[in-house]
Amino acid sequence: MKISDVDMKVEVLVMPVADVERAKEFYGRLGWRLDITPPGVVQFTPHGSACSVQFGTGLTSAAPGAGKGYLIVSDIDATRTALLAAGVEVDAVFHSGPDGPVVGLDPERRSYFSRATFRDPDGNTWLLQEVTTRLPGRVDPGPTSFTSSTDLASALRRAAAAHGEHEKRTGQEDPDWPDWYAHYMLSEQTGVQPPK
């Protein structure tokens, strides 16, 4: 077996914190699930994520605030609004421009371009990144799934909008719209060419 054939999945990120109880309150406020763990370890799992976050006494020698993680979201505006409502300070949304970051959503709302950051009480940074369509080759084109009802609903909304454009182009109603939606939604996840 070659190393490239061995499945490896990120399971846990360790965040360095100074005050475990304060961090526990913060991550609980994010709505993340508190998992059962051994004594001295606190673990939270973000909604829809297969990877968890741990902190606790002696888990890392990194200084509190040195951690950084990326959170992929399907709608950065809705996510930012929900975080603000939960009392989390979130920086303004920005996108990548030719000369660096530019305040505001990506004008074309391209996948991977719109971002925002927030920090936990220790200063560990979380970068939110809006991803609606995966880059080709980024995800195994085999099995696909939606990790939450929120992601599935967002995918259905994008498919409905794209299908509306498809029907305008063809000038006729599409009775096979469920097949079209399914193909479109899977193409977003796997990075293959969507239907026209």
Image (cartoon, rainbow, N blue to C red):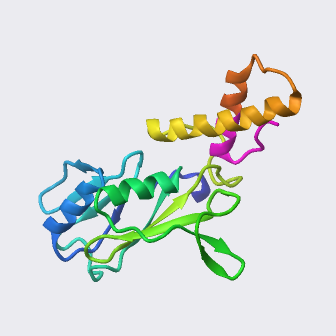
In the rendered image of this protein, does residue 66 appear above or below residue 3?
below
The percent position of residue 56, horizontal first and vertical second, equals 19, 67
Query: Residue at left 50%, top 41%?
Result: 151
Q: Determine the image quadrant of residue 159.
A: top right
Relative depth, front residue between 107 and 21: 107
Q: Determine the image quadrant of residue 170.
A: top right
In the rendered image of this protein, does residue 145 appear above or below residue 38?
above
Q: Would residue 194 be counted in the magenta stretch? A: yes
Magenta stretch: give its range: 184-196
Horizontally, residue 91 falls left or right of residue 40, namely: right
Q: Would residue 36 be counted in the magenta stretch? A: no
Q: Quadrant of the C terminus?
A: top right
Q: Residue furthest right?
A: 170
Query: Residue at left 74%, top 32%?
Result: 164
The percent position of residue 184, horizontal first and vertical second, equals 70, 36
In the rendered image of this protein, does residue 42 appear above or below residue 63?
above
Query: Residue at left 64%, top 54%?
Result: 138
Query: Residue at left 66%, top 29%?
Result: 182
The percent position of residue 55, horizontal first and vertical second, equals 24, 66
